[in-house]
Image (cartoon, rainbow, N blue to C red):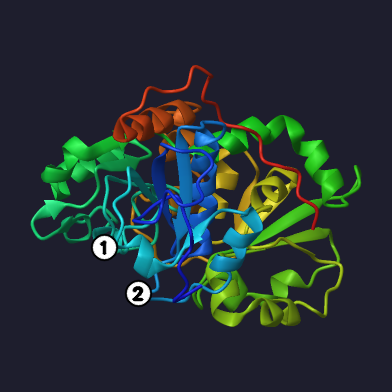
Amino acid sequence: MSGVWVDAPVGPRAGRRVTVAGCQTVLVLVPHVVAATRLFDVLELLKADRRVQVVCTVPDTRGISWGTHEFLQRQGVLTLPWHQAAGVEFDLVLAASRRDVEHVLGPVLVLPHGAGALKSRRLDGHGLDRHELMRGGRVTAAALVLSHDDELRALTRSCPEAVPHAVVAGDLCLDRMRASLPHREAYRRALGVGPDEVLVTVSSTWRPESVFGSRPELYRTDAHRTAVVIHPTTWSVHGPWQVRAWLADRPDLIVIPPEEGWRAAVIASDRVLGDHGSVTQYAAAVGVPVDLGTRAPVRPGSLADLVARGVPDIASALSSRLDQAAGLLRAAMYRLLRLPEPASEARAEPVAAHHV
């Protein structure tokens, strides 16, 4: 789409062909598929509001974004070229990464794109560092979403200027998984898993020390049915053909697409075999038994560390607002939009039973 003007309901030509006029415009900043899946959870909270128009953009300033445009196209969402989106003021900007937020105009709400805002693996920082939160002497986010009160305490120490912008809203992804637990049997049927079969999901984050990078033998067992969840960055860097080719000697594997389906697979599973990535932490948080196939160095006290040590209540460590995220996030968005909230209840919906 680069170099093409999209006749969109924003910008100087906004009025030409618009049917629903006078909307508040929301820009969704989508640098990669991981952010996209988290952001589309939040967009569910804006559905059916004719006062709101949503558009997306994929920043072209850095990194690999293979599959991101394709994901947005499948969703049917209007996508603006980056050069156009960066030159228009929006009523709200949604981001699940702090990358490039300083290049867009409008109040920015920043969400974590994994389990928690405190990054699990980093030993040299915790993800709420001052240099990541400020540009030109100011806090870039109008609303900085945190999952837990512990994160707010860490933010108070690292960047007190950002505390007035913080919103402790819990974790919508976790809340949706909790809402999905009654649908476990439907997910198993969608995956083609019989009632007497054992399903193990092998989950991998990215980088060489991940399960997919370092333990290929875990994908080659006849002891049970195996679902495969691989971090979207791996799919982007190596390409879907290559990822599937590396698994082609086991055609019985249930390979979960990178965009969605991992939550249903986790809930359908009898066990998750993973690493220090977020999927393993979410699995533990909803009560699925977890084993670790690798043990990379992680920050003491992080969610990954708690899972590795077998701490029993991961859910309360991940979110201090369990089952409240939908209401808190919607309230924060409408506050920034300067609109009254819809009268309907905001709630976390169960995830769809995806066929693979």
Q: Is residue 277 visible?
A: no
Name the quarter where the C terminus is drawn. bottom right
Residue bearing the label numbered 1: 103
* Residue at 51 percent of width and 25 percent of height: 346
* Residue at 14 percent of width and 48 percent of height: 159
Density class for disc 2 (Cα within 10 Å; few <14, some 14-19, many ≥20) is few
- Secondary structure under tag 1 reads helix
Residue 9 is labelled as: none
Residue bearing the label numbered 2: 61
In the picture shown, does residue 112 fall above or below 234? above
Where is residue 214? Give x, y as percent: 58, 77
Q: Is residue 315 visible?
A: yes
* Residue at 57 percent of width and 31 percent of height: 48
Where is residue 32? Give x, y as percent: 48, 65
Q: Are marks 2 and 1 in contact (CB under 8 Å)?
A: yes
In screen coordinates, is 275 left or right of 198? Answer: left
In the picture shown, does residue 255 fall above or below 283? below
* Residue at 16 percent of width and 41 percent of height: 156
- Secondary structure under tag 2 reads loop
Where is residue 38? Give x, y as percent: 50, 49
Density class for disc 1 (Cα within 10 Å; few <14, some 14-19, many ≥20) is few
